[in-house]
Image (cartoon, coloured by chain):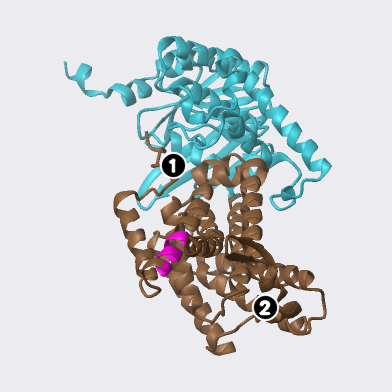
Chain colours: A brown, B cyan
């Protein structure tokens, strides 16, 4: 039973990060019908910005600001940096190809992905970077928390899970309640008709990249709080975020959340009950099964546009 | 004639070697209802796509309210005051009836995309105003798009109501000129009569100038101040409904010359 609780906790932590990444895929796919394969690398840049920000703030052993301020600042820095990166990618890699056949921006996305990953490797080397959050407040983030049975739920996981869910709820409110959300939904359904209803499509697209990339930046920090990062981590994590988006129903926001959690749990249980070596295999087997048997995903709808 | 609201000056459009519109002059006066007729492939929808900025003309100039709008983006043209409906309905079926109309109202509000995230009191007030505007536009259609339907998804509407919603959505952009692309297509005789009455009401009550593409000659006869007939992208007749309907070129375009003459 304790094992199950521990694995569920791991799955929830991992899944909430995957969900944040999947949201970025879904936002962009929903509007541009583009699989932004550079998204995982935006996530990676987020992990690096977080790392750099920690160093600027004095490191984790002797930070110059209180712990919570530090955590908030590094997350905001990663979100802002990634948002800018997302805008730049859209402007230079996708916008010129807006009216090209769909395969062209896809190839461009792969190019951007490699460009970012290997530029980072060239600039900063290929070694692992550890945030070393254990040194914050003498390990308080790991030692404090609460217990379920014999399982400790440490603060560091609570931070990840709670902040991921808060961001998902905020995003959901943004898309369902605000005018920019309506503009996004209108654009995702029919870009040309939306333009003729006075909606500035370019702004909506940029906004989708800003939102998605900022979420990836936040996911990067939340992920790297516990797990070391490196320059080419974006490829695998990006693929998993993409898998989560597909499982949930790509283009659907609740779908991305559900897909992320399903994937997190699947990976975690596979690690615990089968083998850590097989967990990635299982993840991609799930992807293939969904693509074959339920391509619209858990919450996606079959296309209702054509009558 | 009243002041010209829309003026096409020698507009041409070619896709590769295919000339869809050739040196077309067309104008619509303020407050006028002008119908464009012509056989399939005459270039009528292309004409709308040129006016709304979906296509850039290969020649000529389009002037709206005294200013050239050639080369502007579709959303900029909409914000200048031209709105349209589509021959094949293009509602946002993933949104509610009210949201469809609200989405169209954002273009002419002050706040940009980014500012609208901040829910300041001014923002909320504006959002409330947009909501009221949307409801007012929907209320124009009386019982047909009444209150309880406003929160229903647009895909739940009947075909005729979808056409009405498209018009409501177009009017929410606060246009001066409405472009209606076959508003009566696929409607039964009763609905067609309602649409005819509605188009007249849009002018008298709404104050819109209207350019309409329509195949149903009863509708055209019922609403038009002036009729323009196109064939192969060339204007072949212009005038009152009776003048155009009896024009030999128009009869020829629709029926061909062969039959009668040979006998």
Q: Nearer the viewer, residue B208 or B152?
A: B152
Residue B253 as seen in the image, left or right of residue A73: left
Q: Are marks 2 and 1 in contact (CB under 8 Å)?
A: no
Question: What mark, if any, has residue B22 been given in the picture?
Answer: 1
Q: Which residues are magenta?
A: A264-272
Residue B47 as seen in the image, left or right of residue B115: left
Q: According to the image, label 2 marks what residue? A: A133
Q: Nearer the viewer, residue B197 or A193?
A: A193
Q: Secondary structure at mark 2?
A: helix
The C terminus of chain A sits in image quarter: top left
Quadrant of the image occupied by residue A287 = bottom left
Residues packed near mark 1 inside 10 Å, few (<14), some (14 to 19) or many (20 plus): some
For residue A269, above or below residue B45:
below
Q: Residue B81, image x and y in percent?
A: 66, 36
At 67% across and 25% down in the image, what residue appears? B135
Q: Nearer the viewer, residue A209 or A259?
A: A259
Chain under disc 2: A
At 53% across and 73% down in the image, what residue appears? A41
Asked if the magenta segment contains residue A267, the reply would be yes
Q: Residue A121, image x and y in percent?
A: 53, 86
At 45% across and 54% down in the image, what residue appears? A33
Q: Secondary structure at mark 1?
A: strand
- Residue A35 visible to the viewer: no
Q: Residue A61, image x and y in percent?
A: 74, 84
- Residue B160 visible to the viewer: yes
């Amino acid at each position: 039973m304790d094992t199950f609780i521990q694995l569920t906790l791991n799955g929830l932590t991992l899944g909430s990060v995957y969900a944040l990444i999947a949201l970025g895929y879904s936002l962009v796919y929903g509007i541009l019908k583009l699989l932004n394969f550079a998204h995982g690398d935006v996530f990676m840049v987020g992990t690096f910005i977080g790392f750099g920000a920690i160093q600027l703030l004095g490191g984790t052993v002797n930070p110059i600001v209180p712990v919570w301020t530090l955590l908030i600042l590094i997350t905001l820095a990663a979100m802002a940096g990634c948002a800018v990166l997302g805008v730049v990618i859209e402007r230079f890699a996708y916008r010129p190809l807006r009216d090209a056949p769909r395969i062209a921006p896809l190839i461009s996305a792969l190019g951007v992905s490699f460009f970012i990953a290997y530029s980072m490797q060239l600039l900063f080397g290929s070694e692992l970077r550890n945030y070393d959050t254990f040194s914050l407040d003498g390990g308080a983030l790991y030692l404090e928390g609460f217990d379920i049975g014999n399982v400790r739920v440490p603060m560091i996981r609570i931070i990840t899970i709670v902040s991921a869910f808060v961001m998902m709820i905020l995003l959901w409110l943004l898309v369902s309640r605000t005018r920019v959300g309506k503009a996004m939904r209108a654009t995702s359904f029919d870009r040309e008709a939306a333009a003729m209803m006075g909606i500035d499509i370019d702004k909506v697209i940029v906004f989708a990249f800003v939102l998605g990339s900022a979420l990836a930046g936040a996911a990067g920090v939340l992920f790297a709080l516990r797990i070391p990062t490196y320059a080419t981590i974006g490829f695998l994590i990006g693929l998993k975020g993409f898998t989560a988006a597909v499982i949930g129903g790509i283009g659907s926001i609740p779908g991305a959340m559900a897909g992320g959690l399903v994937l997190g749990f699947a990976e975690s249980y596979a690690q615990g009950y089968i083998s850590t070596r097989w967990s990635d295999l299982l993840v991609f087997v799930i992807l293939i099964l969904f693509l074959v048997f339920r391509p619209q995903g858990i919450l996606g709808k079959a296309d209702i546009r054509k009558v | 004639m009243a002041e010209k609201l829309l003026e096409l000056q020698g507009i041409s459009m070619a896709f590769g070697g295919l000339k869809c519109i050739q040196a077309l002059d067309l104008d619509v006066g303020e407050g006028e209802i002008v119908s464009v007729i012509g056989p399939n492939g005459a270039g009528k929808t292309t004409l709308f796509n040129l006016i709304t900025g979906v296509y850039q003309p290969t020649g000529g100039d389009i002037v709206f309210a005294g200013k050239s709008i050639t080369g502007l983006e579709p959303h900029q043209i909409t914000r200048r005051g031209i709105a349209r409906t589509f021959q094949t309905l293009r509602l946002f079926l993933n949104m509610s009836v009210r949201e469809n109309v609200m989405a169209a109202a954002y273009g002419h509000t002050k706040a940009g995309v980014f500012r609208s995230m901040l829910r300041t009191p001014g923002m909320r007030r504006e959002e409330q105003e947009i909501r009221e505007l949307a409801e007012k536009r929907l209320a124009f259609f009386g019982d047909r798009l009444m209150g309880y339907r406003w929160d229903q998804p647009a895909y739940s509407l009947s075909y005729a109501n979808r056409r009405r919603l498209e018009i409501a959505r177009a009017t929410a952009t606060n246009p001066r000129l409405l472009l209606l692309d076959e508003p009566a297509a696929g409607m039964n005789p009763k609905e067609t009569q309602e649409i005819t009455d509605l188009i007249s009401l849009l002018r008298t009550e709404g104050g819109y100038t209207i350019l309409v593409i329509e195949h149903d000659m009863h509708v055209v006869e019922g609403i038009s101040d002036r009729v323009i007939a196109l064939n192969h992208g060339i204007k072949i007749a212009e005038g009152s409904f009776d003048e155009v309907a009896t024009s030999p070129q128009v009869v020829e375009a629709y029926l061909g010359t062969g039959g009668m003459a040979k006998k």
